[in-house]
Amino acid sequence: LTNRPSTQLLPATWFTKEEKNPKNQKEFILKPLPEVDSWQVELLYQNAVRASSSLGEGLDDIFKEEIALQSELNYKVCVVRNGGSGQLCMRKKPTKSNLFGFGEVQSTLQRGYGQYTIEGEDDENSLGELTHAVFVIHGIGEAMWSKEDVSTMGMSDELDQLRMVVNKKKVVSWREECKKCEKMKQPLPRPPNRVEFLPIEWYDKVRSPSHALVTSLTAVTLNSIPALRSIANDVIFDVLMYLTPDYCEAILQCVTTQIVELYSTFQRIYPSFIDRGGKFSLVGHSLGSVIAWDILSILKDSMGKSIPKGDRNDPIRIDLPESPTRAQRTLAILDNKQPTSPMGYGAYAAANVANGPENNDSKHGTWGPNLSKKMMQTIPFTPDMTVFLGSPVGLFLTLRGVHPIFDEMRAIAEAERASLIPCDNNEEAAAPPPVFDVSPIICSPFSLPTGALYNIFHPSDPVAYRIEPLLLPEGVDKDEFPSPLFLSADGRVRLHVKARQVGDQLFKQFGSLSALFDKSVEKAAVDAAAADATEAARKKAIAGGTNDRKEKTLPERPKFSGCVKGRECSFRLGGRSTRVDFQIQPGVIDNEYLSAVSAHSSYFSNEDVIDFIIFNTRSVDESASVVS
């Protein structure tokens, strides 16, 4: 299910046993000894076996014999006696010994593969059936992180680590529950479900060294400061490529095709996965979150005809309108213009222009990608959950001019709801009129086809942006924005975070007192200036006469200041998730400038993110046990 580089399969008899953890001898890695050295080591081993037998001549000559390795010229192999058990063993050590052997790196050789367990294998075997598959789309810089000379792990390696940590956490928690049930003499719980993380890689598909764009980029790159220019070419250039319609289409096509192929392969491997209630989800990191957003936008565009509209049971629910409705005609009359269809909305910027200049309203942008043509291929499922990690989606949506679109959707929802409220004043009606919620709609009803959507970010991540403010009216003050929720699987906020919140609130209260005094002084000055201006205008009118012509003024934009304060915001962007923005809880000692260096690349190893993913990908049985 993953694309891995081809590796050579070799026969081996002897292996170098390298310990991963000196404190735990069970954690080690076996590396095969090349065949050119293996047969010499095997010959020495056979001589040692014969010499140590009852018919042998003793081991004195064997201990003096050494074999110089041809594959590693600085190392040799000899037979030594293990100090603890007295058994013989083969040892690889440097040819030139230091004084008293201090600082020497010696390794034990093992004959045959033996009993060997891959890290995380025991935990994975303890899990139950597979119930969730997560497609993970990488972000910028994967061309650099995948290089062998770079210490930073690529996404495939990060997902391997994430999979092991998730499995270990699940198994440890399950075993603790089993111990509790055994003490209380209750039935043991079922093993936890298994979650598979599938990497979606697109960088090597659109950035091959033979590509004309890559060749031209290499040609124009200066030779000075190669390390910094490599960052610009391998990291920043990904964003610039995605802003162009051709490469944006190539990347989306590449990612969609991979998901479709993996979806089909996954069902061949697990034919009963969907029948057993298995679910698929999307995770996008960095630029990968923008790709995931655009893929859902394309899916929404293809599902437009089947999306339900507002009705009496749910008068607020409204998505992309296909024809001018009563609500649209009402808005058109208020704006003194003819209604257009589909109100300038679209998942593609180029699609709006193709409809003709008369249908292209300059104030309308797009929530989806900027493509030269409509994409026909979509992902074959609706994600159960979509997670953005360190996402610049808010920045991209701002550049696409999406805020007026979300505002107009909210106005349409208001008018649609008003058109559904009966206005019959017949007093003889036997039944009382139905009760409708007439509170103003604050959050835009725009939604994407996903079961839940979470925008998770580290507060010090320089690449991350919020999404919720774009779903609120444009006139709302920044101080009124709902604060992002702290990321926590169980909803608990750590004590030091609460203490920091209390300190910030006290600081704001003291600051508001001084601001109130400053505003009172400023208001007095403004009132005095306004009075002087009114008096001057009156004198000028008396001296120059009145002008009957009225200047044409543009209507003022509605002011939404104070509309969010004291209200609970519920965003419909991601289905069952009423909130979108979640921030990772900072550490006890956490400097935001120092954290900014590593914040963007630490999501897959963050404990809060891992616990959040475990909680939201648990099986139905686990969910029921949590509720009980």
Image (cartoon, rainbow, N blue to C red):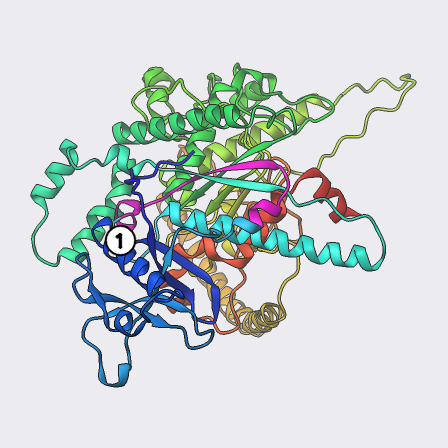
What type is the residue that disc 1 sits on?
A: Ser
Which one is nearer the viewer's eye here, 62 or 8?
62
**Place of residue 244 in the rendered image (x, y in percent of width and height, measured from the top left):** 26, 33
**Magenta span contains residue 130:** yes
Against 231, is 442 above or below? above
Instruction: Reply above or below: 203 against 91.
Output: above
**Residue that badge 1 annotates:** 38
Q: Residue at x 51, y 35 (%)?
A: 407
**Helix or strand or loop: what does disc 1 sit on?**
helix
Image x and y of residue 211, in percent: 16, 32
Residue 425 inside the magenta-drawn segment: no
What is the span of residues highlighted in magenta in the rendered image?
Answer: 123-146
Left or right: 567 in relation to 593:
right
Seen from this angle, which residue lies furthest front?
55
The image quadrant where one finds the N terminus is top left
Q: Position of residue 87 (x, y in %)?
A: 43, 70
Residue 49 image offset from top left, x and y in percent: 36, 61
Whether 515 is drawn above or below 483: the answer is below
Task: Characterize the local packing of mark 1: few (<14), some (14-19) or many (20 or more) Cα atoms within 10 angstroms.
Answer: some
The front one of 265 and 24 is 24
Q: Residue at x 23, y 47 (%)?
A: 234
The front one of 292 and 28 is: 28
Q: Residue at x 62, y 66 (%)?
A: 494
Relative to residue 334, is residue 537 drawn left or right? left
